[in-house]
C-alpha cells in the first residue's frame, strides 16, 4: 500500500475542509476522514449527496450508502437520515474530525441500472469510481469555500485518475473550490488505461479499461481526438483550455446495449454496455459538446424548461460536427434525424407538453426524458435552414451561436435570455419578434413545427408519410460540404 501523512493536519485553513481517503483495493468501502476547524462554537452541519436528487438520477436515498459514521473524541453526533444531514455538536477543540465510510457495492434498482451506476459510487475489487457529490459533504457554513483531498492509503501502483489534475498521483493533495466539488471524477483500477492526446496543444485524456477490449477501446475513441474535438474547437473558435478528459467505463450490471453519461465541466464520464454503435458515438459527441452549449451558453432555469437549448441545440451541433468530420455519412445522418428525432417526436403522446412540465416526469418517463432533446434538435435544424436561406448561404447556425456568445460577453452576463436569443437571430437577418414568438409557441408551449409550410435549403427535402415528417436529401448533396462553414 502507498501511504501519505501530513504532520500539519492541525494547521488546516479556516475556510478549508480536508478530506483524507483510504482504500485497500479489495473491499467495496472507501474510508473518509474529514478534518476541519470549526467556525461555530456550537455545531457544524453537513448534508450528504447532491442537493438536487431529482437532477442527479433521482438519488434521494443516497444517504444509505454511508456507514460507520462517527466524530472525534469529545464531540457528539446527531444523524438525520431523512434530511441526509449530520449535525456535529462541539465539545472539544480544533481540529474537528468526521469519519464516514462510503459503501460502493453494486446495488441497482430494476429500471435504474444506468443512473445507479453513473451517479452512485461503484467500488469493487480492483476498481473504484466516484463523483464529487458522492465524496464530499455539503456544508451549511458557506465560509468553507475550499476542499482538499488526498490519500492516506491507496493500492500501490494501481492506475489513478482525478479530474482536478489528470497527471496527479494519490499522494498529491488536490485543492478544489467548494463550488466545483460536483465536477470531480475519481477513478482507480487495475485495468484502467489512460492515453494522452493533444488538440491545438491542449492536453486531452482518453480513459478506458482493459476489461472490455471488444466493444470500446482506445482505437475506437481515437477519431474523436483526431477529428471531432478539433472540429468543435474550430466551430467555437475556442483554443483555450487547461485540459479535457473523456472517461468511458463499462456498466457492470445490465443485459442490454445502452449508455449514459454525465458532463463534468472540463470532461465527460460515460458508462456503457454493448458494442460502440451510432447511439454511443452520438452520446459522446453530444456530451463533450456541452463545454459550450449548456456551460458557456446557458439559460437560467428553475428545472429543465430550457433543456430544448441546453440539450436539443447541443445535440444538433454534435451531429453537425460529426457530419462535418465525415464520422457519419448521409445514410446515418438521415436515419438519426428521422428515426431518433422527427418520428418519435411527432408520434410521442407528450409531444405538445409544455417545457416546464418535463422535470416532474424526467426520471420516470422515457418520453418526457427525451422530449426537449427532440424538440430542441428539430427547431435547431429549422433555424439553421432559415439562417442559410436569409443570408443566401453566407451564414448558418454557427454564426448565430457565435453571435449569441458575443452578446453574452458584451453584456457580461452569466446567463443568456430569450431576448438575447432573438437578437442573435436578428443579426442573422431573421425577424427578432418572430423568433421570440417561436421560442414561446414551439419550444416553451410545445406547438409542432409544420414542415409542410416551411422552406428548407435546396439540399434538404421534407415530406409527410402517414402524418409524420420525413427528411430526405438531394442525390448529389454533399453532407460534409453542407456542414463545413468554410465552404
Image (tube, rainbow, N blue to C red):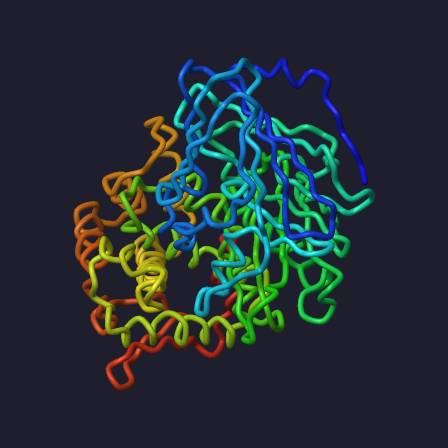
Q: Position of residue 270 (x, y in %)?
A: 57, 57
Q: Is residue 225 above or below residue 6?
A: below
**Relative to residue 295, is residue 184 drawn left or right?**
right
Q: Nearer the viewer, residue 114 or 207?
A: 114
Could you tell whether 149 is left or right of 47 in the image? right
> Residue at 53% of width from left, 69% of height from top?
258
For the residue pair 308 and 405, the one nearer the viewer reads as 308
Residue 31 x/y as whole percent: 63, 40
Q: Quadrant of the N terminus?
A: top right
229 over 154 or under it: above or below: below
- At 61% across and 72% down in the image, what residue appears? 274
Q: Is residue 91 visible?
A: yes
370 over 311 or under it: above or below: below
**Residue under the point 39% across and 56% down:** 393
Q: Residue furthest bottom?
A: 466
Q: Quadrant of residue 35?
A: top right
Q: Nearer the viewer, residue 58 or 403?
A: 58
Q: Is residue 395 visible?
A: no
Amino acid at each position: 500500500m502507498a501511504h501519505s501523512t501530513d504532520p500539519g493536519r492541525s494547521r488546516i485553513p479556516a475556510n478549508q475542509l480536508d478530506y483524507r481517503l483510504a482504500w485497500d483495493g479489495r473491499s467495496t468501502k472507501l474510508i473518509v476522514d474529514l478534518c476541519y476547524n470549526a467556525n461555530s462554537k456550537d455545531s457544524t452541519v453537513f448534508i450528504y449527496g447532491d442537493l438536487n436528487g431529482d437532477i442527479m438520477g433521482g438519488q434521494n436515498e443516497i444517504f444509505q450508502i454511508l456507514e460507520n459514521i462517527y466524530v472525534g473524541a469529545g464531540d457528539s453526533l446527531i444523524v438525520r437520515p431523512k434530511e441526509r444531514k449530520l449535525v456535529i455538536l462541539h465539545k472539544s477543540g480544533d481540529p474537528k474530525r468526521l469519519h464516514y465510510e462510503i459503501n460502493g457495492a453494486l446495488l441497482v434498482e430494476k429500471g435504474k441500472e444506468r443512473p445507479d451506476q453513473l451517479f452512485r459510487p461503484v467500488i469493487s475489487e480492483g476498481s473504484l469510481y466516484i463523483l464529487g457529490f458522492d465524496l464530499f459533504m455539503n456544508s451549511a457554513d458557506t465560509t468553507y469555500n475550499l476542499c482538499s483531498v488526498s490519500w492516506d492509503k491507496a493500492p500501490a501502483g494501481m492506475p489513478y485518475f482525478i479530474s482536478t489534475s489528470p497527471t496527479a498521483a494519490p499522494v498529491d493533495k488536490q485543492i478544489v473550490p467548494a463550488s466545483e466539488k460536483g465536477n470531480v471524477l475519481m477513478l482507480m483500477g487495475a485495468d484502467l488505461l489512460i492515453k494522452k492526446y493533444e488538440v491545438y496543444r491542449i492536453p486531452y485524456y482518453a480513459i478506458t479499461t482493459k476489461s472490455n477490449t471488444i466493444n470500446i477501446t482506445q482505437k475506437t475513441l481515437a477519431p474523436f481526438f483526431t477529428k471531432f474535438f478539433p472540429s468543435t474547437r474550430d466551430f467555437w473558435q475556442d483554443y483555450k483550455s487547461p485540459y479535457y478528459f473523456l472517461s468511458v467505463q463499462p456498466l457492470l450490471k445490465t443485459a442490454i446495449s445502452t449508455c449514459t453519461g454525465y458532463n463534468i465541466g472540463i470532461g465527460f464520464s460515460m458508462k456503457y454496455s454493448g458494442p460502440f454503435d451510432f447511439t454511443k458515438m452520438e452520446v459522446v459527441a453530444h456530451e463533450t459538446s456541452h463545454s459550450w452549449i449548456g456551460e458557456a451558453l446557458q439559460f437560467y432555469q428553475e428545472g429543465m424548461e430550457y433543456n430544448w437549448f441546453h440539450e436539443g441545440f447541443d445535440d444538433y451541433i454534435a451531429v453537425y460536427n460529426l457530419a462535418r468530420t465525415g464520422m457519419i455519412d448521409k445514410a446515418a445522418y438521415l436515419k438519426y434525424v428521422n428515426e431518433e428525432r422527427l418520428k418519435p417526436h411527432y408520434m410521442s403522446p407528450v409531444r405538445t407538453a409544455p417545457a416546464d412540465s418535463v422535470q416532474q416526469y424526467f426520471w420516470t418517463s422515457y418520453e418526457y426524458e427525451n422530449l426537449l432533446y427532440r424538440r430542441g434538435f428539430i427547431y435547431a435544424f429549422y433555424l439553421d435552414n432559415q439562417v442559410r436561406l436569409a443570408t443566401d448561404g453566407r451564414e448558418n447556425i454557427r454564426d448565430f451561436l457565435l453571435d449569441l456568445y458575443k452578446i453574452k460577453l458584451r453584456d457580461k452576463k452569466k446567463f443568456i435570455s430569450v431576448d438575447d436569443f432573438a437578437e442573435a437571430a436578428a443579426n442573422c437577418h431573421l425577424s427578432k419578434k418572430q423568433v421570440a414568438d417561436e421560442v414561446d409557441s414551439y419550444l416553451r408551449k410545445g406547438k409542432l413545427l409544420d414542415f409542410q409550410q416551411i422552406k428548407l435549403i435546396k439540399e434538404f427535402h421534407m415530406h409527410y408519410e402517414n402524418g409524420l415528417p420525413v427528411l430526405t436529401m438531394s442525390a448529389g448533396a454533399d453532407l460534409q460540404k453542407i456542414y463545413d462553414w468554410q465552404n
